[in-house]
Image: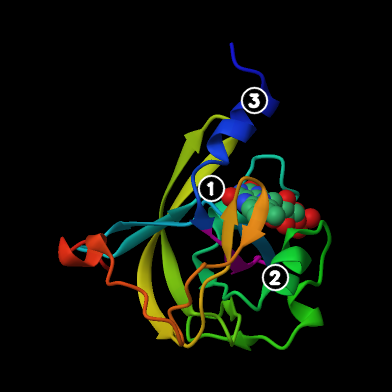
Amino acid sequence: MLDHQSLRHAFGNYATGIAVIGARGDDGMLVGMTVNSFTSVSLDPPLVLYCPSRTLRAVETYASARFFSASILGAGQKRLSDLFARQGESKWESIGHRIGDTGVPLIPEALASFECENHAVHEAGDHLLVVGHVRAVHLRESADPLIFFRSRYRALTQSEHGGDLETSQAVHLGWGL
Ligand SMILES: Cc1cc2nc3c(=O)[nH]c(=O)nc-3n(C[C@H](O)[C@H](O)[C@H](O)COP(=O)(O)O)c2cc1C
């Protein structure tokens, strides 16, 4: 049986972006957290997912809120990632956020923000899998992404903004979403 530390270390070899999830509780309170478990799932219908830990104080809100947002952070937004990874309330209130048409909070300068309707919630060990149906997309795309790899924030070595990054193989194959 692999111990948690070894597993965490091995999983960390999968480089991801960083997203901030936002949702509103029944009482109107906004909750938010940094995740690297955000993933696109399906184009038709348009589905995404993220995985909240069962130990989160607001796990019930994440599981039951009708809508949630996912804002993809840019390279210059490490401070926001740190803020939303901290334990505590009122994270949204401490930054200049905006509210989308579905009532969820959004990070205005994010590379892209998705407003999603709760589509399904699955149990998955010590986490839940929350699947969302994308109802609205807000694109900015004027910066490089914030990357998380081996427990550290990283940047692209060759900037897409100012550098001549080669078109990725994924786009050639038609996998670029
Ligand atoms: C890079 C990074 C990725 C994270 N990814 C997740 C995740 O996918 N799921 C999760 O439940 N927590 C994740 N966390 C931890 C949560 O952000 C953190 O537990 C949460 O913000 C605590 O806030 P709370 O006090 O409002 O519950 C991540 C933290 C960091 C720094």
Element type at marker 2? Answer: helix
Q: CA distance from mark 3 to mark 1?
A: 20 Å
Q: Label 2 amino acid?
A: Lys
> Measured along the vertical axis of the image, is residue 126 above or below residue 172?
above
- Tell me if 117 is positioned left or right of 146 in this view: left
- Tell me if 133 is positioned left or right of 87 in this view: left
Q: Earlier in the sequence, mark 3 or mark 1?
A: 3
Indicate the quadrant where residue 155 lies.
Answer: bottom right
Q: Nearer the viewer, residue 61 or 171?
A: 171
Q: Nearer the viewer, residue 87 or 64?
A: 87
- Residue 25 lies, in percent from the top left, at 66, 65
Element type at marker 1? Answer: loop
Residue 58 visible within the image: no
Main SS of the magenta part reads strand
- Residue 89 lies, in percent from the top left, at 82, 65
Magenta stretch: give its range: 17-27
Identify the residue under disc 1.
51
Q: Label 1 amino acid?
A: Cys
Identify the residue under disc 3.
6
Q: In which quadrant of the rendered image does the N terminus lie? A: top right
- Residue 18 lies, in percent from the top left, at 57, 62
Q: Label 3 amino acid?
A: Ser
Q: Earlier in the sequence, mark 2 or mark 1?
A: 1
Residue 151 visible within the image: yes
Residue drawn at the location 69% of the way across and 27% of the way down: 5
> Measured along the vertical axis of the image, is residue 7 above or below residue 101?
above
Identify the residue under disc 2.
78
> Measured along the vertical axis of the image, is residue 161 above or below residue 75?
below
CB of mark 1 near ligand 1 (< 8 Å): yes
